[in-house]
Image: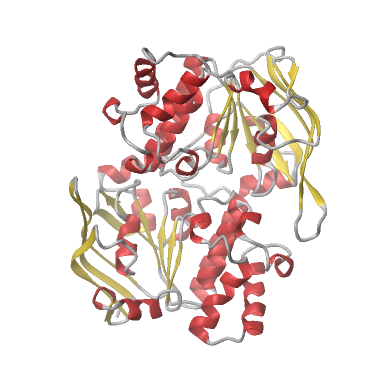
Amino acid sequence: MSLLKVSNLTTRFHTRNGVTTAVDDVSFAVERGEILAIVGESGSGKSVTCYSMLGLIPMPPGKIESGSAMFEGRDLLAMSESELRDIRGDEIAMIFQDPMTSLNPFLSIGEQLVEPLIYHRAYSRSEARVRAIELMEECGIVRSAERFDSYPHEFSGGMRQRVMIAMALITEPKLLIADEPTTALDVTIQAQILELVAKLQDSHDLGVIFISHDLAVVKELADRVLVMKQGQVVETNVTQALFSAPQHPYTQELLAAVPKGQKQSNDLTADSILLDVQGLTTTFLDRNSGQRFKAVDDVSFRVQKNEILGLVGESGSGKSTIGRSILKLVEADSGAVIFDQQDLLPLSQRQMVPLRRRMQMIFQDPYASLNPRMTVFDTLAEPLLYHGLATRKNVEGKVLELMDDVGLDRRAIKKYPHEFSGGQRQRIAIGRAIATRPELIIADEPVSALDVTIQKQILDLLVELVKKHNLTMLFVSHDLSVVRALCDRVMVIQHGKLIEFESTEQLWKAPQQQYTRDLLSAIPQID
C-alpha cells in the first residue's frame, strides 16, 4: 500500500469574478522512502494540490470538488479539522516557501521549535530544548544554543529557511511536503539541506513531496517527477527518463529555460568607472552579545559603465548589506562610495534625494516591496511625478510606456499587486526601478523565487533594458548558474570580505580561493 495515494483531486476557487479550477483531476502516489518532485510554473497548481490535502486552502472561496487522498488507508479529505490537526506537524509535516511569513515574529526561534514536540510527543520542555538544539545544528545553524532565544527578524533569509526545515523534521514525520524549501538558500547550504533531507528520507523511510522550480535540484534529489500545467498533470516519469527524454512539449520548454553556459562578452573599458567603492565597512549590533560585528569588512571594488557585476556568497555573507550601504539604506561606518565623482557616505538623506533618481534598487520580494494599496499605475507614476519626470497630464502615457518596457499588459494598469503572479509582480518592481531612467541599479536576488520559464523572461528583460537604457547593474544572487549567464564580472564575498574578483568565465575556469571552488562545486547540474 502506498504511503499516500491521491485520486482525481479537483479544487476550485469561487469568487465574484467567476470560478477558477486550480487543481484539475490530479492523481499520483507517494511510496515510503520515495522522493516525488512536483514541478511547473507559478500558478500551475503545485502548492494548491498539497494544501488541499491538508485542509490549508481558505474555504470559501476554495472548495475541494472531488477526489480522495488516502494516507496510510485514511482519507485526509474526509477528516474533520481536529483529526487533520493531529496529523499535521506530526505524521505529515510541511516546509513552507516563505519563512518570514510562516514564522511567528513574536515568539523566539526556540519556542517555535519545541512546540510540536510538546504538543505532539509529550516531551518535557528541557527534553524538547535539547532535541531542538541538536536539529538546529544538523540544519547548519551555527551557535544553535546561543541563538535558541533569538527571534526570526534576527536571522537572514537562508537561516530562517533552515529553522523552517528543522521545525518540519523535528517530530520525524512519515511524509514531508517541502514547498520550495531551498529557494532562499545559497548553493552550499542548499547542498547541505538536500543532503540532510535525502539522509533523513533514507534512514527513516520518509516519503517526500518536493515542490520546486529548480530543475537541477530536482534532478539530483528526486526519484520521480510529476509535471503540472494549469492545474493538470501533463507528464510523470522516473527522474532519469524524464530529463533524458521529456515527452510533453511543456516539459521540454521547462528544461530549455534552465540557464546554461556563459554570457556573450561585453566590451568594457577600465576608464569608464561609474561607481568606486573604497574600504566600505558596515557594522551591526549583536543583541545577544552586545557587541558590534562587521557585516561588510573593508570592501573595495569598481563598477564600469554598462557592466553587470555579479555579487555572490552564502546567506549572511554581507551581499545585500553592500548594496544597501551603497544606496544609504543602511548607514556604513567607514569608507567611501564614489558615484560619478561624488562620495555618497557623508551626504544626508535630504542631500541624497536628487541622486536617488540616478540610483535604484530591485528588491528580492516584490510582494513585500510593493504597496498593496497602490495600483500598477500609482506604483509606476509615483517616482515619475516625485522626480519631476512627468506631469499629471502626460504621466499615464509614460506609465504605459514603462509597462510596455517590462512586458506588462496595458489593460492591467488599474490592478493591485495581489492580482498578479510572482513574475508579473517582479516586472512591476523592475518597471518602478527603471522609471527614473537611472544609471545604476542594484538588483537583490530579483529572480530567486521565480520558476525557470519566468526567470528566463526576467533575465532576458534585464539584459534588454541594460542595453536599451545604458544601465549599469550590481546583481546580487546566490544562483551561480544565473550569474554565469548574466554577469560580465563576479565578486565573491565571505564573512563580509571580498575574497575574489574576476571576469565571469575566468572565475569559473580557474577559481583561486577554496571557498569559491566550494561554491562552484555545489551547483546542481542538469547536464
Q: Is residue 108 left or right of residue 20?
A: right
The x, y position of residue 473, in whole percent, is: 58, 26
Considering only vertical position in the picture, is 420 above or below 263? below
The x, y position of residue 271, in whole percent, is: 72, 12
Q: Is residue 13 left or right of residue 157?
A: left
Considering only vertical position in the picture, is 213 above or below 175? above
Q: Is residue 215 left or right of residue 52?
A: right
Which residue occupies 36% across, 24% down?
403
Numbered-mark total = 0
Which residue occupies 40% across, 35% down?
374
Q: Tell me if I can see residue 67 in this picture.
A: yes
Which residue occupies 67% across, 24% down?
350
Which residue occupies 77% across, 50% down?
285
The x, y position of residue 249, in whole percent, is: 26, 42
- The colour scheme used to paint the residues is secondary structure
Q: Is residue 203 left or right of residue 417?
A: right
Considering only vertical position in the picture, is 289 above or below 484? below
The x, y position of residue 289, in whole percent, is: 80, 59
Q: Tell me if I can see residue 435 in this picture.
A: no
Give whichever of 86, 202 is nearer the camera: 86
- Looking at the rendered image, the quarter that the N terminus falls into is bottom left
Query: Which image quadrant for residue 241?
Result: bottom left
